[in-house]
Amino acid sequence: MKLYESLCILRPVQAETENERVIEKMKEVLGQAGATILNFDNSGKKKLAYDIQHERKGTYITVQFEGPPTVVFELERFQRMEDQVMKFMTVRLNPSDLVAVAETEAEASGEDAGDGGIQ
């Protein structure tokens, strides 16, 4: 099993139910293809660096998952066919990169624990 990360930008819609439908379908596609979702992050609506399909904002979705290479094909096939998806990109991760990110996040949350930075 290999580790992957997929970033997807959805159209900004007035009703969040449309984006929720796409997110649930994305999770369903991953599950049916045999992937294990490790981390799922809905970063919300953000301003785009440039206009994409005449839109100035987009909803950013990041998914880290583990699975066979066929999972990427199924996920990207779904993203290509879905009208709500403006852009997407899937990359393969090294396991050491995933551990390094988890350690960095743990250190950052430890600093916010209120110890004042005194050691």
Image: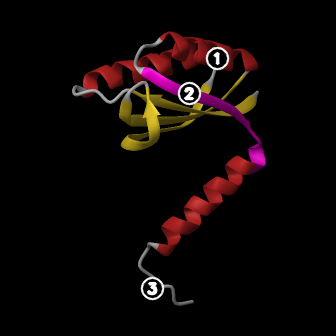
Q: On the rendered structure, is 88 left or right of 12? A: right
- Looking at numbered disc 1 in the image, what kind of residue is underneath it? Gly
Query: Upstream in the sequence, badge 2 or badge 1?
Result: 1
Query: Which circle, 2 or 1, is nearer the viewer?
Result: 2
Q: Quadrant of residue 84?
A: top left
Q: Nearer the viewer, residue 110 or 22?
A: 22
Q: Quadrant of the C terminus?
A: bottom right
Query: Which circle, 2 or 3, is nearer the viewer?
Result: 2
Residue contact between numbered discs 3 and 1, judged by CB atoms under 8 Å = no
Q: Is residue 90 magenta?
A: yes
- Looking at numbered disc 2 in the image, what kind of residue is underneath it? Phe
Q: CA distance from mark 2 to mark 1?
A: 20 Å
Q: Nearer the viewer, residue 37 or 94?
A: 94
Q: Quadrant of residue 115?
A: bottom left
Residue tagged by mark 3? 116
Tell me the number on the disc at residue 117.
none
Residue visible at 28% across and 27% down?
A: 13
Relative to residue 61, is residue 15 depicted above or below? above
Q: Position of residue 30 (x, y in %)?
A: 57, 19
Query: Upstream in the sequence, badge 2 or badge 3?
Result: 2
Q: Is residue 117 magenta?
A: no
Residue tagged by mark 2? 88
Q: CA distance from mark 2 to mark 3?
A: 40 Å
Magenta range: 85-96
Kind of element beneath mark 1: loop
